[in-house]
Image: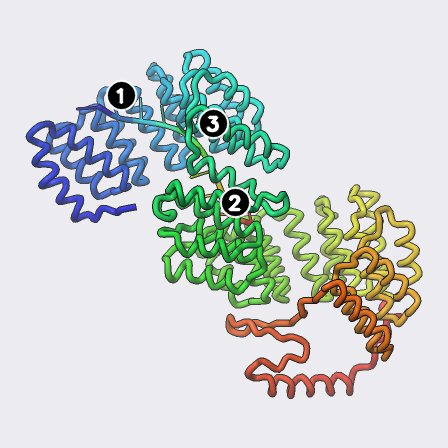
Amino acid sequence: MIRLSSFKAFVLVTSRYYHSASLSSPSRNLLHLLQLSIAHSSLDLTHQCHARILSLGFSQNPFLATKLISAYAACGFPTESQLVFNSLEQKSVYLWNSLINGYVKNQKYGEAFRLFYQMCCCGVLLDDYTLATLCKVCSEIGDLKAGKLIHGKSVVIGFVLDIIVANSLMFMYCKCGEFRECLKLFGEMPERNATSWNVVIAGYADSGDRNFTKEIIELVKDMQIEGFKLDGFTVSSLLLLCNNDNGKMDYGRELHGFIVRNELGWGFLGSDIHLGCCLIDMYSRNNKVDSGKRVFDRMKRRNVYVWTAMINGYVQNGAMEEALVLFHEMQVKDGVEPNRVSLLSVLPTCGLLADFTSGKQIHGYAIRKKLNHDLSLCNALIDMYSKCGNLNYARRVFEDRSFCRDVISWSSLISGYGLHGMGKEAVFLYDRMLQKGNKPDMITVVGALSACGRSGLVDEGLRIYNSAISEYGIGPTAEICACLVDMLGRSGRLEMALDFIKTMPVEPGPSVWGALVSASILHGNLEMQDLAYKFLIQLEPENPSNYVSLSNIHASCRRWHIVAKVRTIMKERGLRKTPGCSWISISSTTHCFYAADKAHPCSNSIYEILDGLISLMKGIVHPPDFQCMT
DNA sequence: AATCGTAAGG
């Protein structure tokens, strides 16, 4: 967007433009200038036009007043619009509509309804413009009841045949979850335009239901047959359908080409930022985050949506460092302020990298922006602090009464305690949650059970498992069952674990057998171990981790012939395991370590300290007696 | 000579 500097605007008002214009019709040219103010959201130019209107005695000119009201609203000052409105002696429907729309453009929906009521009281007849504007309000706030009233009103007055009113009504029905009503209206329309088609297509695409792909393709064809070209709105809906898992990823690339060829973003996305977002999102969803980044890099303008889409793309593709770097660049290089969703996107990276410092900084930022009462954000903070190992901070967020906790808040903290071996605290919290009348969900139960497993609280775990199923109607999922097997197994109750697997209400999956494998290894039960491995490898013949751990166990018993056999099988099947690693963040730099890794510049001193720690442990800690933990 | 409608990121 070209921003008019106040100087240019001043020149425009006072010299060339205005003087040449004043010879013919000053009011018409002021109208033109106000149109410019709207196009550029220029408060300066609006003020200067306003001053001219007053000094030339045009303050009661209805045309200028209508535009002036729109201009102030477009600059974000609907209260100024109201003052202009108040100063008019004759209040036409144009004036009312312009003012109501001004409030709507500034998200003051209550004010819009209030004015509408006032307008009706004043006996002003509403028209198609009023109806369309009010319909938009209903869409924005999802008020189906009010929307239906507007629909009724449109039918009575006869404006339901108006394309724009009908489009607004269709959109309202989509937003209020009444897609069938939208389709009905679409079918009844005597005449349609591109927006009519776009609203229906978006309605199908937003439903996320794959079964509609055929309908959408038909609609796009018919739209073109009726003489309408696909535009940015159409393409952004279509991009939502392009996914790897339904084999439609290549269409995404084609649509990208379509956007470029048809200049839908005018010389690469200089104009339609939204399309850029959709492309970045489409590529990220399909694990082509690099292609998304290329779109991002070539964009001429980037707003907070674009930056957040890119950050989120990296997070979803596991590139945490890149996400954090981008989050920083967004603010420093582009001066774009993160908002609630940006923070929600970036917070998981701090948890996953255990980057406590960055996490705390984001928390501080959230407090400054007064976003710290937001439920989702608080939940993300609890999770982040838990994963960074700082349960006290997590607890502090959790206990802050300025937000209303939900089941996710409880689950995050319960899992946090469990993760750090504080099983008793986790169980205590779980019980407190129930006492307060909150219902647990599957994730809460997994958190509580794994906490019990890690801390050897078998009786507590069994109690939680039984009550979750019988009292809270939580179906025993594969994940919950795996937690139970893990808990029993870790405590040495291998037979009990196997019995449970045999009678389990769901089919035992890899996670269940994997838990039994680990427990058998822990307790040196070879027979059980072989049995569990057999099932595990049968269920997951392509998972390299299974073979690596199998080979490691046999290696530790020096059964080299079996090790060789396992490695051969892996090679034959082309399986390669991504090496696991550990990491630590110090002053916002993440240091990563693989097994026997000597690549770190401080490697020598690190191993020196490590050796020291190992000998210290060997000297004072006895081999663990797992029976004691039951 | 004026006032109206379609999209996004967790």
Residue that badge 2 annotates: A252
| Residue at 81% over, 53% down | A509
Real-space CA distance between mark 3 and mark 1, rounded to the nearest whole angstrom: 41 Å
Real-space CA distance between mark 3 and mark 2, rounded to the nearest whole angstrom: 20 Å
Residue A266 lies in what quarter of the image?
A: top left
Give the amino acid type for the residue marked by disc 3 in the picture.
Met
- Chain assignment, label 1: A
Give the secondary structure at mark 2. helix
Give the amino acid type for the residue marked by disc 1 in the picture.
Lys
Residue A55 % position (x, y): 11, 33
* Left or right placement of residue A201 versus residue A5 in this view: right
Asked whether disc 1 touches disc 2, contact meaning CB atoms under 8 Å apart, the reply is: no
Q: Which mark is residue A75?
A: none
- State whether residue A629 is above or below residue A429: below
Instruction: Give the residue furthest to the front.
Output: A572
- Chain assignment, label 2: A
* First in sequence: mark 3 vs mark 2: 3
Residue that badge 1 annotates: A91
Residue A296 % position (x, y): 43, 54
| Residue at 22% over, 25% down | A63
* Left or right placement of residue A259 versus residue A218 in this view: left
Q: Which of marks 1 and 2 is in front?
A: 2
Residue A354 lies in what quarter of the image?
A: bottom right
Residue that badge 3 annotates: A223
Residue A218 % position (x, y): 55, 28
Mark 3, other Cα within 10 Å: few <14 / some 14–19 / many ≥20 = many
Q: Which of marks 3 and 1 is in front?
A: 3
User: Do badges 3 and 1 share one subunit?
Assistant: yes
Give the amino acid type for the residue marked by disc 2 in the picture.
Gly
